[in-house]
């Protein structure tokens, strides 16, 4: 309906499993990001497609991504996930706290639980296999205990 059928071809499938009808492409667009940008991501597939099919003047989108950290002060969440183990129906199971703290958790947070500004700790440029490290320092913006980042 947009009259671009002769210019744009949409091909669905894993890039590793398909063969493109052309030798090179001008643009690669992919929603490859996972949790914390890289967890469960498809970045390897995008880099594979870029190396195999992208023309010299081509572009990859998104072309820049950041990983950021912020301090979280959520006493309710801390009580429910960590302090909880000190008294589980009358039993002291505090030894479980070590395992719980070491486990990564993906959660949606309320903005008011952030106690610092987000700080970019890693940048990924999609055209290159390059990670740019950045030193991390951030100002804590409210009082409270830092329970997470």
Image: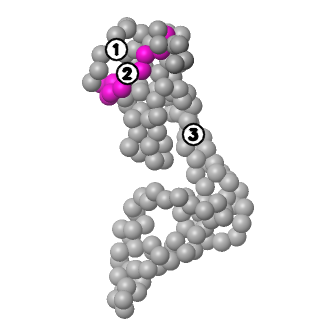
Residue that sits furthest to the bottom in the current view: 90
Asked if the stretch drawn in magenta spans residue 38, the answer is no
Residue 46 drawn above or below residue 70: above
Q: CA distance from mark 3 to mark 2?
A: 28 Å
Marks 1, 2: nearer the viewer: 2
Tag in front: 3 or 2: 2
Which one is in front, 146 or 135? 146
Residue 20 numbered mark, or none: 1
Region of the chain picked out in magenta, as a range: 7-16
Determine whether 118 is above or below 50 in the image: below
Picture coordinates of residue 21 (x, y %)? 34, 10
Magenta: main secondary structure: loop
Q: Position of residue 44 (x, y in %)?
A: 38, 31
> SS for tag 2?
loop
Left or right? Give the position of 21 relative to 107: left
Residue 90, given in percent of the width and then of the height, sits at: 37, 91
Q: Which residue is mark 3?
A: 66
x 30%, y 16%: residue = 19
Question: Where is mark 2, residue-wise?
Answer: 11
- Whichever of callouts 1 and 2 sits on the residue coming sooner in the sequence is 2
Identity of the residue drawn at 70% across and 70% down = 143
């Amino acid at each position: 309906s947009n009259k671009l059928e002769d210019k744009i071809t949409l091909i669905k499938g894993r890039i590793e499993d398909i063969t493109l009808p052309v030798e090179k492409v001008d643009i690669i667009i992919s929603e490859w990001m996972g949790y914390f940008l890289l967890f469960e991501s498809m970045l390897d597939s995008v880099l594979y497609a870029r190396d195999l099919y992208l023309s010299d003047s081509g572009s990859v989108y998104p072309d820049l991504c950041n990983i950021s950290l912020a301090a979280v002060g959520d006493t309710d969440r801390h009580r429910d996930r960590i302090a909880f183990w000190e008294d589980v129906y009358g039993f002291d199971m505090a030894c479980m706290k070590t395992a719980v703290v070491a486990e990564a958790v993906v959660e949606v947070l309320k903005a008011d639980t952030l106690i610092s500004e987000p700080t970019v700790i890693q940048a990924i440029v999609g055209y290159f296999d390059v990670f740019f490290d950045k030193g991390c320092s951030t100002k804590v913006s409210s009082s409270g205990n830092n329970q997470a980042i």
